[in-house]
Amino acid sequence: MRTSQTYQRGSALWENIQAICIALLLALFIRTFIVQAFKIPSGSMLPTLQIGDHILVNKFIYGVKMPFTGATLIPVSQPEINDIIVFGYPVDPKLDYIKRVIAVAGDEVEIRDKKVFINKSPFVDTHGVFTDPLIHPSTLDNRDNFGPVIVPEDSLFVMGDNRDNSFDGRFWGFVKLDAVRGEAWRIYWSWDLRLPLFSVERLQSIRWNRIGNAVD
């Protein structure tokens, strides 16, 4: 015969299970539609983003998207020039890349000796940095001389801020809008990933002055 104490324990357990399920569903909803955490593993966006920056990405800003397909259910806005976006790498969509939008659909993009031109006008490039004084000819690769090309419909042209050390649209093409995960929003943690995880050096590398900073 079930006692009242047994009933109370069963009821409390069921309530705890319900609370956990609700919390998990809420976390999944937030991660899918609102905000998601990412970390920066490479230096392609230096100095804007450091290796080991952990960032929050605003997924809602570009609309509510269908999971897995990327189709927009509720449009809000579209990526604009100079937005820093996270997207599925066109060659392998399972990989997440982060770059800056340089041109949008219909724009003509050309790079001449490291200088970017959009629609035949010099691009006001306040974020790009260069560490290599050498100019690569187009016969070598597309790093310093590229185009002109027209950005296709529903696509973006992106580049890393660390222009001489970024594997970006100059080498693999355009980003489809439905591949965009969201816009980089804020740094919530930062330390040097190159140091051993369980070490004093890793703890000493925490960049307290970056935590909480907006990404722009």
Image (spheres, grey):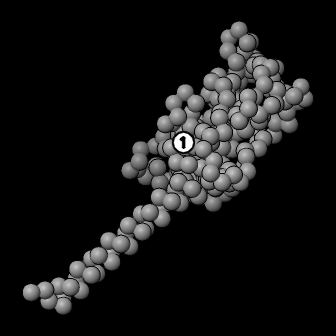
Residue at left offset 70%, top offset 39% = 100
Quarter of the view holding residue 117: top right
Residue at left offset 20%, top offset 85% = 7
Residue flagged by tag 1: what amino acid is it? Answer: Thr
Q: Most extreme residue toward the right, as rendered? A: 121
Determine which residue is flagged by label 1: 69
Q: Nearer the viewer, residue 149 or 188?
A: 149
Q: Is residue 46 visible?
A: no
Quarter of the view holding residue 13: bottom left
Eyeballing the image, is 155 above or below 5? above
Give how far across and how far down residue 113 sits, in percent. 80, 19
Give how far across and how far down residue 190 sits, in percent. 56, 52
Disc 1: CA contacts within 10 A as few (<14), some (14-19) or many (>=20): few
Q: Is label 1 in a helix, a strand or a loop?
A: loop
Give how far across and how far down residue 73 sits, in percent. 62, 51
Q: Nearer the viewer, residue 133 or 117?
A: 117
Q: Nearer the viewer, residue 22 or 99?
A: 22
Q: Most extreme residue toward the top, as rendered? A: 139
Q: Nearer the viewer, residue 213 or 203?
A: 213
Eyeballing the image, is 51 above or below 189? above
107 sits left or right of 178 in the view: right
Give how far across and how far down residue 54 sits, in percent. 55, 51
Residue at left offset 41%, top offset 48% = 197
Q: Quadrant of the N terminus?
A: bottom left
Q: Is residue 67 visible?
A: yes
